[in-house]
Image (cartoon, rainbow, N blue to C red):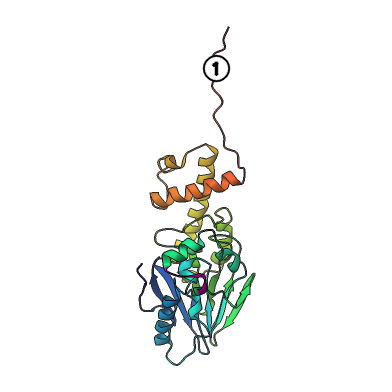
Amino acid sequence: MDFSLTPFEAVADRVYVAVAEPATVNVGLVVGTTGALLVDTGSSPAQGRAIREAAASVLGEAPLTDVVVTHAHFDHCYGLSAFAGPRTWGHRNLPEAREHERLAEELAELGLTRGDLALPARTFSLAATIDLGDCHAELVHFGPGHTTADVAVHVPARGVVFAGDLLESAPFAWAGPDSSLADWPRTLDGTLGTLRRDTVVVPGHGPAMDRAAAFIQRAELAWLEATLVALWDAGTAVEHVWDSTSDWPLPRAQAEEIAAVRFAQYERAGRPRRRPLPLLRPTHS
Ligand SMILES: [Zn+2]
């Protein structure tokens, strides 16, 4: 597996983003006068150490004081054990969210063991504030969306928001078995309502977005859920969803994978499907 890291590049005043592989994940760095905050930690302890070194080269003598993981997925969270020293932050649902059913398989694929993983020392339920001197960062959780433990990082003085995987610009936000697509648009509204016209929105994956692009993806997520509900109710099979409309805002393979996940969730929730009426059968005389 390719573990690599680009240098940190500025996206706003003393706010930087590096891109880590695998998964082309954005790693953020916010530098204040008394401290610095890292947003997400990469896919392994070794990658976490590489991120720490890259951050140190940007920071110079300034200390890395805080590290936040935006959610429990491997590409954001599994580098956390490389950050002994700084305060580490995450949502209080994160420990439970990390214990998913594919964990052992995923660790094997990454060449890791459970002992390589760490949890944040500090958790919160709604919000936490990190003082960085001449600016502060607000860590906020507005409810279920991409996962049950999503954290968005708002840095108002720098005009930047890190959205984690609540937004993705390449190719499109990912809804998996641990996502709540029906709640996701309303959860995003908490963050979107704070954006100014010139706010830089850093998604979990892909290039930075502007406010309009974030608004559009919110609408597309709502469209996706409404469309999947309608297709489920009509009894459409997953292999036929793509041909039902040409309006998909995401690639075919991703649309079909999300449809399969969502249909399984509807099934588990006991959502009825509209069935065609039974055909009249000829009766024997
Ligand atoms: Zn994710």
Residue placed most toward the observer, 37 or 87: 87
- In magenta, the rendered stretch is 111-115
Q: Can residue 77 be found in the magenta stretch?
A: no
| Label 1 CB-ligand 1 distance < 8 A | no
For mark 1, give the secondary structure. loop
Front residue of 246 and 148: 148
128 relative to 223, above or below: below
- Quadrant in the picture for the C terminus: top right
Asked whether the viewer can see residue 202, the reply is no
Q: Position of residue 224 (x, y in %)?
A: 49, 50
Q: Quadrant of residue 148?
A: bottom right
- Write the residue at 43% across / 58% down: 172
Can you identify the residue that label 1 sits on?
281
Point out the residue furthest to the top here. 285
Determine whether, in the image, residue 55 is placed left or right of residue 71.
left
- Percent from the top left, x then y, of residue 87? 56, 82
The answer to whether residue 113 is magenta is: yes
Q: At which x and y percent is residue 166?
A: 51, 63
Name the residue at 42% across, 90% down.
60
Quarter holding residue 282:
top right
Residue 92 appears in the picture as rendered: yes
How would you rate the neighbour count of disc 1 (Cα within 10 Å): few for under 14, some for 14-19, many for 20 or more? few
Seen in the picture, residue 64 relative to 274 is either above or below; the reply is: below
Q: Residue at x 55, y 61 (%)?
A: 100
Q: Kindly give the residue lying farthest to the right in the view shown.
A: 125
Q: Nearer the viewer, residue 155 or 121?
A: 121
The percent coordinates of residue 5 (x first, y second) are 37, 75
**Quarter in which the N terminus is drawn:** bottom left
**In the image, what residue type sits under mark 1?**
Arg
Query: 59 above or below 46?
Result: below
Q: Name the main secondary structure of what is drawn in magenta.
A: loop
